[in-house]
Amino acid sequence: MRNYGSHAPKLYSYSDLKKITSSFSHKIGKGGFGQVYKGKLPDGRAVAVKVLTETNGDGEEYINEVASISRTSHVNIVGLLGFCYQRNRRALIYEYVSNGSLDKFLNSGSSSTTCSLEWTTLYSIAVGTARGLEYLHRGCNTRIVHFDIKPHNILLDEDFCPKISDFGLSRLCERKESILSMLGARGTAGYIAPEVFSRAFGHVSHKSDVYSYGMLVLEMVGVRNNLGKDLSLQGIMNEEDEELARKMILVGLWCIQTKPSDRPAIEKAVEMLEGSLHSLQVPPKPVLFPPTRSIPESFTSTSTTTSERRFISGVNIASE
């Protein structure tokens, strides 16, 4: 932190945290790391205070998070405003993001497989999240690999602008480095790239985040939650919705290719999302996943091209 000079986040005492959070009276989140409370800084800014549990070992994840996020400044990255490191009491003070995490909007519709957000909003969240990852991978002086991209770690502000959060598992590496050496897998089941489990699939790199991002996008579309069922995309109201859904599925499937070298860099994923649907090729089927399941009639109409039917028939392969 001394090396950051004036750019370092502010250091707060534990008694400061009690004042900021009104003695931790308003809990807004809970996880394996500890609790999150809403608070207010002396200047009136609303903040989220993440208080880590006292059994966090040597504090590696805490230091990772402070070191990683202190290097960032981007509209799609949650802002770290301060921290507390007082004996075994550790906390992080973030900008408050009013709409909470993306996961609460998924599977929140009228059935267990629907999302309450419109397709245009889902699409903008997908693009914004990719831009945040692009910044971490290319925009910082030191490349940051997040290693835990999932709906729970994508926060949404009042305008549903996404902000990547929770850098506890992240790794810093020089921009010129492309391969990371790691001991053990890190991440969340269902989003971890194959090479993080076993080096037989390739080297661990920033492409491991691309895989997690692909699984995130497929979950946003509803693919991962339709396993064992016919695919039925919810809330398609017009041709624009259908085109956005198709682009998200195609990009998601490209991002979860088994071999890291077959996945696009995250900046390419942004380009694919923002480009024309007709310019997107159908990706090969990832070899780790089970055979495809049946295709609903609504997606095999005469208006659907052969290539589109191919990618639709491959959608249900995106299992955990």
Image: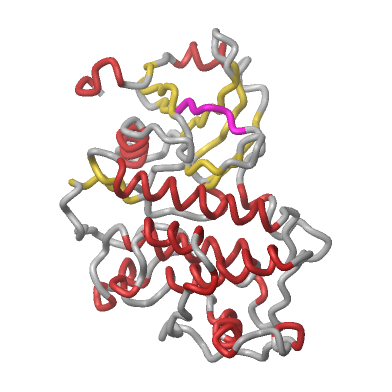
Region of the chain picked out in magenta, as a range: 92-97
User: Left or right: 142 with respect to 148?
Assistant: left
- Could you tell me residue 251's position as x and y percent? 49, 68
Write the residue at 31% across / 71% down. Answer: 260
- Could you tell me residue 244's position as x and y percent? 62, 64
141 or 304, nearer to the observer: 304
Q: Main secondary structure of the magenta part?
A: strand
Placement of 37 over or under 277, stated as above or below: above
User: Left or right: 257 with respect to 261?
Assistant: right
Report the residue that reaches farthest toward the top: 42
Placement of 78 over or under 13, stated as above or below: below
- Could you tell me residue 153's position as x and y percent? 52, 47
22 or 284, nearer to the observer: 284
Residue 250 included in the magenta stretch of the image? no
Write the residue at 70% across / 88% down. Answer: 300
297 or 30, nearer to the observer: 297
Write the residue at 43% across / 59% down. Answer: 271
